Image (tube, rainbow, N blue to C red):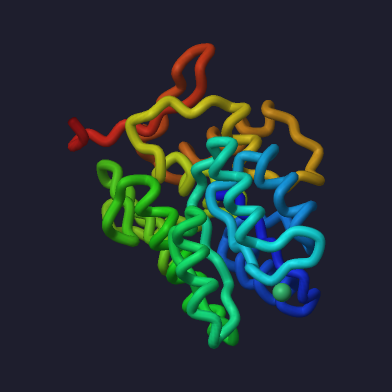
Amino acid sequence: MRLLVVEDDPDLNRQLSTALTDAGYVVDRAFDGEEGHYLGDSEPYDAVILDIGLPKMDGISVLEGWRRSGRSMPVLILTARDRWSDKVQGFDAGADDYVAKPFHLEEVLARLRALLRRSAGHAKSEFICGSVRLDTRTGRVTVEGNPVKLTSHEYRLLSYLMHHVGRVVSRSELVEHLYDQDFDRDSNTIEVFVGRIRRKLGVDVIQTVRGLGYLLASPDAH
Ligand code: CA
């Protein structure tokens, strides 16, 4: 899952990005509204954390701009503690959730997980596909109850497919959602990682759809 953090306070931006990276996400960072708006408008993020008080372009205008141009990714806004009007304006502009400053990082992470699984049409933090279970809360993956050790990159790939069960996901989509903007992207590496995940899981849940991409098909899905 690839996220964007738009926050002008450098310390807070770093804290958020570090916590999100540690939690297994890929993170791009912006430090003012214009840069944030540009990135959110041009890159396919799975979710965005957006501060409201930003230099160059305020967060509400950034969000309104995205929604106007049809960008529908979940957006969590960061509001000042006593500014209830920020929350109202934020929701009206298309925000999906908010956290008031100062906040606990754990709360931001939990709200993000909720946003991501809801946008995947999923009510629980655990994703199940056949005998494979992936818990987005703990980052644990099991097959028939046995823990499987994945690298952070393998986890991100499997997690993205689990969030999009039943839909063919192309290699280029995976590349866009698994690497940050500075990464030298090569879609051939995706094939290598899929191979490793298949070997580690030992069960055939990831199907290759020739010429199109990959499909995680749940046996119990209709
Ligand atoms: Ca700010």
Q: Residue furthest top?
A: 211
Left or right, 28 with reference to 222: right
Left or right, 82 with reference to 128: right
Q: Is residue 64 above or below residue 81?
A: above
* Residue 180 percent across, percent down from the top left: 72, 47
Left or right, 15 with reference to 204: right
Left or right, 100 with reference to 168: right
Foreground residue, 189 or 221? 221
* Residue 75 percent across, percent down from the top left: 52, 57
Answer yes or no: is residue 140 visible.
Answer: no
Q: What residue lies at 51% left-to-right and 46% top-to-bottom? A: 73
Foreground residue, 62 or 31? 62
* Residue 45 percent across, percent down from the top left: 59, 46
Q: What residue lies at 60% left-to-right and 50% top-to-bottom? A: 2
Q: What residue lies at 59% left-to-right and 27% top-to-bottom? A: 171
Foreground residue, 160 or 62? 62
Q: Ligand 1 lies in which image quarter? A: bottom right
Answer yes or no: is residue 126 visible.
Answer: yes
Residue 205, located in which quarter of the rendered image? top left
Residue 148, located in which quarter of the rendered image? bottom left
Q: Quadrant of the C terminus?
A: top left
Q: What residue lies at 61% left-to-right and 60% top-to-bottom? A: 60
Q: Is residue 82 above or below residue 198?
A: below
Q: Is residue 28 above or below residue 100?
A: above
* Residue 120 percent across, percent down from the top left: 37, 46
Number of numbered markers = 0
